[in-house]
Image (cartoon, grey):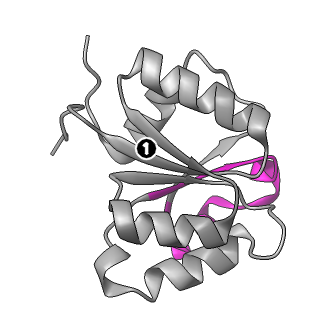
């Protein structure tokens, strides 16, 4: 079943301000999604709990709490187990598809990514329709 694009809210957890700016601009302009940004996994847990986003874009390599530790903490909270997660990472080539699937991650999008097609990759991974 395809989910309609209306008022999608994406939580972006990435410690690189340049990546945050590009992702936020692309998704807000090209897909009309709302992007909530945080710079750490710890902030991400708080924001995910407070905002209940439609999806989370998650960097793996971050200081203190990395993406894997974030997933463990996220999945430990029953109210957040339904939030789909997509890795947005420079480590994409190092991960086997079966590895991220066992983690509950819907897709891995490699950095660097194409800013003009990022929204399509996310929509495809999450089975979301895009507006015209």
**What's drawn in magenta, residue-wise?**
85-105
Task: Please give the count of numbered marks on the rendered protein.
Answer: 1
Q: Which residue is mark 1?
A: 125
Q: Confirm whether residue 25 shows in the render.
A: yes
Magenta includes 93?
yes
Nearer-the-camera pick, 51 or 58: 51
Q: Quadrant of residue 7?
A: top left
Q: Report whether 27 appears left or right of 31.
A: right
Q: What residue sits 64% from the left and 73% below the top?
A: 42
On screen, 110 above or below 101?
above
Q: What residue sits 25% from the left and 30% below the top?
A: 129
Instruction: Give coordinates of residue 47: x percent, y percent.
Output: 47, 63
Please identify the quadrant where the N terminus is shown.
top left
Q: Report whether 30 appears left or right of 96.
A: left
Q: What residue sits 36% from the left and 74% below the top?
A: 80
On screen, 79 above or below 66?
below
Q: Report whether 71 appears left or right of 82.
A: right
């Amino acid at each position: 079943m395809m989910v309609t694009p209306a008022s999608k809210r994406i939580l972006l957890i990435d410690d690189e301000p340049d990546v945050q700016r590009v992702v936020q601009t692309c998704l807000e302009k090209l897909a009309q999604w709302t992007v909530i940004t945080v710079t750490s996994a710890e902030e991400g847990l708080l924001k995910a709990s407070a905002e209940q986003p439609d999806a989370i874009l998650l960097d793996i390599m971050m200081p203190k709490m990395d993406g894997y530790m974030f997933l463990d903490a996220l999945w430990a909270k029953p109210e957040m187990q339904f939030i789909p997660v997509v890795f947005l990472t420079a480590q994409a080539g190092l991960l086997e598809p079966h590895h991220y699937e066992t983690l509950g991650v819907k897709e891995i999008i490699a950095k660097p990514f194409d800013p003009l097609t990022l929204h399509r990759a996310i929509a495809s991974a999450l089975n979301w329709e895009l507006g015209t």
